[in-house]
């Protein structure tokens, strides 16, 4: 059975004190835990160690929003997968559309990051998603297929550690959500690709999350679809009650 996951990407939000408060609030309020279900928060780097402490004894897990392509060296200002491993990170985002767009991350860089994370026993959440233009042109399936292409170079064992998040760029932070049917179409497409490239067992076991203006009012419908295994939440993850209302929709 594949895992159901709700992941909260805080992006560059919350100062240190606010971040600790938010983590504490999520941990305190997440009491209705279920087997096969995981709740993960992705605070900014600065907060990670303190949030690890805050989450001790709770069922909430933690990941980082980014890592560098190299393990160590003269890369001023950067953080490596090995460093993240040393403070207990379980997950890390790779390929978020904001990093692709604002930091020009390309397939080579994303592949390097995936390798570093897998070597450090951190599970990557690999993000993909088409722009509004791609959607309007009707080329969105090809775009998704292209973005996923780099994953097929990994071994089945490596791939088994990965989670995929489908995040249409036009839905991120815009208030405009993909309909549950639009999400299901892409999720089923992604699962078919995994089946073709990696086999039926991995297709069945890979969690595919939806992201893009997911909120308490639409999470039920989205998570009700067969191939939607949870969500990657931005804005609504900054409020513990909203975030946990979305978690409830997993049931
Ligand atoms: P959003 O962000 O929920 O604010 O649209 C989602 C994401 O970027 O992961």
Image (cartoon, rainbow, N blue to C red):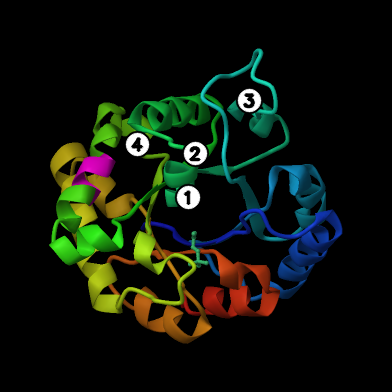
The residue identified by callout 1 is 98
Q: Is residue 187 left or right of residue 29?
A: left
Using the numbered discs, state the Cα–Cα distance from disc 1 to disc 2 in whole angstroms.
Answer: 8 Å
The residue identified by callout 4 is 159
Asked if the beta carbon under badge 1 is closer than 8 A to the nearest atom of ligand 1, the reply is: yes
Q: Residues within 10 Å of mark 1 (few under 14, many from 20)?
A: few
Using the numbered discs, state the Cα–Cα distance from disc 3 to disc 1 in whole angstroms.
Answer: 23 Å
Considering the numbered disc 4 on the image, is that residue within a helix, a strand or a loop?
helix
Asked if the magenta segment contains residue 72, the reply would be no
Q: Residues within 10 Å of mark 2 (few under 14, many from 20)?
A: few
Q: Which mark sits nearer the N-terminus, 3 or 4?
A: 3
Question: What label sits on residue 103 in the rendered view?
Answer: 2
Whole-percent x, y for residue 66 in the image: 57, 40
Asked if labels 2 and 1 touch by Cβ distance under 8 angstroms, the answer is: yes
Q: Which mark sits nearer the N-terminus, 2 or 3?
A: 3
Q: Is residue 27 above or below residue 177?
A: above
Using the numbered discs, state the Cα–Cα distance from disc 2 to disc 3 in whole angstroms.
Answer: 21 Å
Q: Which mark sits nearer the N-terminus, 1 or 2?
A: 1
Asked if labels 1 and 3 touch by Cβ distance under 8 angstroms, the answer is: no
């Amino acid at each position: 059975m594949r895992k159901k996951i709700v992941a909260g990407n805080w992006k560059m939000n919350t100062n240190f004190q606010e971040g600790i408060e938010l983590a504490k609030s999520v941990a305190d309020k997440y009491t209705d835990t279920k087997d096969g279900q995981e709740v993960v928060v992705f605070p900014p780097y600065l907060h990670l160690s303190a949030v690890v402490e805050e989450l001790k004894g709770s069922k909430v897990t933690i990941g980082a929003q980014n890592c560098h392509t190299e393990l160590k060296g003269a890369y001023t200002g950067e953080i490596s997968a090995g460093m993240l491993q040393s403070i207990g990170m379980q997950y890390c985002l790779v390929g978020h559309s904001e990093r692709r767009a604002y930091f020009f991350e390309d397939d080579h860089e994303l592949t390097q990051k995936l390798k570093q994370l897998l070597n450090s026993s951190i599970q990557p959440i690999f993000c993909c998603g088409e722009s509004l233009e791609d959607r309007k042109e009707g080329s969105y399936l090809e775009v998704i297929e292209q973005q996923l292409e780099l994953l097929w170079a990994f071994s089945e064992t490596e791939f088994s550690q990965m989670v995929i998040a489908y995040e249409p760029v036009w839905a991120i932070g815009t208030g405009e959500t993909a309909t549950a049917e639009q999400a299901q179409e892409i999720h089923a497409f992604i699962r078919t690709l995994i089946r073709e490239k990696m086999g039926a067992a991995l297709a069945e076991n890979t969690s595919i999350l939806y992201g893009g203006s997911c909120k308490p009012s639409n999470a039920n419908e989205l998570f009700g679809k067969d191939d939607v295994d949870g969500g990657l939440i931005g804005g609504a993850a900054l409020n513990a009650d909203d975030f946990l209302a979305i978690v409830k929709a997993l049931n």
